[in-house]
Amino acid sequence: MHALREVGVEVPEHTLTAVTGPSGSGKSTFLQCAAGLDRPTAGVVRLGGRVISGMKERGLSRLRRTHIGFVFQSFNLLPALTVQQNVLLPLRLDGRPRDPARARELLARVGLEGREGARPGRLSGGQQQRVAIARALITEPDVVFADEPTGSLDQETGAGIMDLLREAVDRQGATVVLVTHDPSVTARADRVLRLAHGRLVQDSWAGTGTVAAGGVPRDAAAVAGGGPVR
């Protein structure tokens, strides 16, 4: 089966893009290919004008450490580390000075003030998800990819997370691409991409309405091509 087929998309800088669609439509595969975590069997992935789909793993790892934040659907926290140590881990791996004050600030923003010393196993699924979001933002990355970042959260907490992601775009100049099933999340996106059966079937921009895949609304850009991803 083809996880993705003929998906050609260009995501402009400093925007928040939501990727939607039914389960099995290719959303997570799209996100992981865009972040360099999966390699497409055909087609090209570029990040900041640089082709990353053919890069060696060492170069990809360096690129992810320095320019990308990723929120995994399964969180991927290290159980032996405390909450604060998990958040600071990207800085440690990249050889940068650790910034405990920034980690505490982010944890407070996601509602986990006072839980810095806890281990992930002592947290609920929603709390672990918020740690993963703080970890993705600690390096102030150019691009944040997030797979269902509000999926385990109540409505109020989810709204706070969206405030944080919008702030990363609007104030810090980051680019955010996230997968979601939540209409309240898509309502705050600049652009919504809808996938079905591995294909892009809808592309809508805030204020321009919805266009079928292949149409390009005003001020939007699309990259044609892209072969199947197996």
Image (tube, helix red, strand yellow):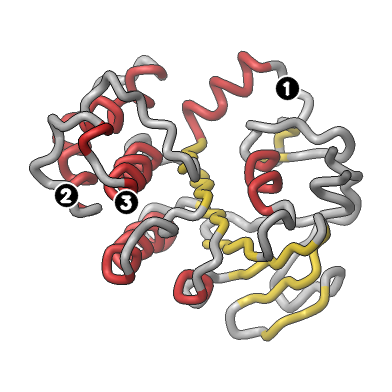
Residue in the picture at 84% in, 41% down: 229
Mark identifier at residue 55 = 1
Visible residue check, residue 101: yes
Of residues 219 and 80, which is closer to you in this image?
A: 80
Of residues 134 and 3, which is closer to you in this image?
A: 3
Q: Is residue 126 above or below residue 180?
A: above
Report, in whole angstroms, how far the alpha carbon at label 2 lies from the one at label 1: 37 Å
Report, in whole angstroms, how far the alpha carbon at label 3 lies from the one at label 1: 34 Å
Of residues 211 and 200, which is closer to you in this image?
A: 200
Q: Is residue 217 above or below residue 21?
A: below
Q: Which residue is mark 2?
A: 108
Report, in whole angstroms, how far the alpha carbon at label 3 lies from the one at label 2: 15 Å
For label 2, count other residues whose C-alpha is less than 10 Å away and answer few (under 14), some (14-19) or many (20+): some
Q: Earlier in the sequence, mark 2 or mark 1?
A: 1
- Residue 202 location, x and y as percent? 76, 72
Circle 2 or circle 1, nearest the eye: 2
Visible residue check, residue 48: no
Tell me if 12 is positioned left or right of 212 in this view. left
- Residue 126 location, x and y as percent? 32, 51
Residue in the picture at 8% in, 42% down: 114
SS at circle 3: helix
For label 3, count other residues whose C-alpha is less than 10 Å away and answer few (under 14), some (14-19) or many (20+): some
Circle 3 or circle 2, nearest the eye: 3
- Quarter holding the C terminus is top right
Mark identifier at residue 126 = 3
Q: Are marks 3 and 1 in contact (CB under 8 Å)?
A: no
Q: Earlier in the sequence, mark 3 or mark 2?
A: 2
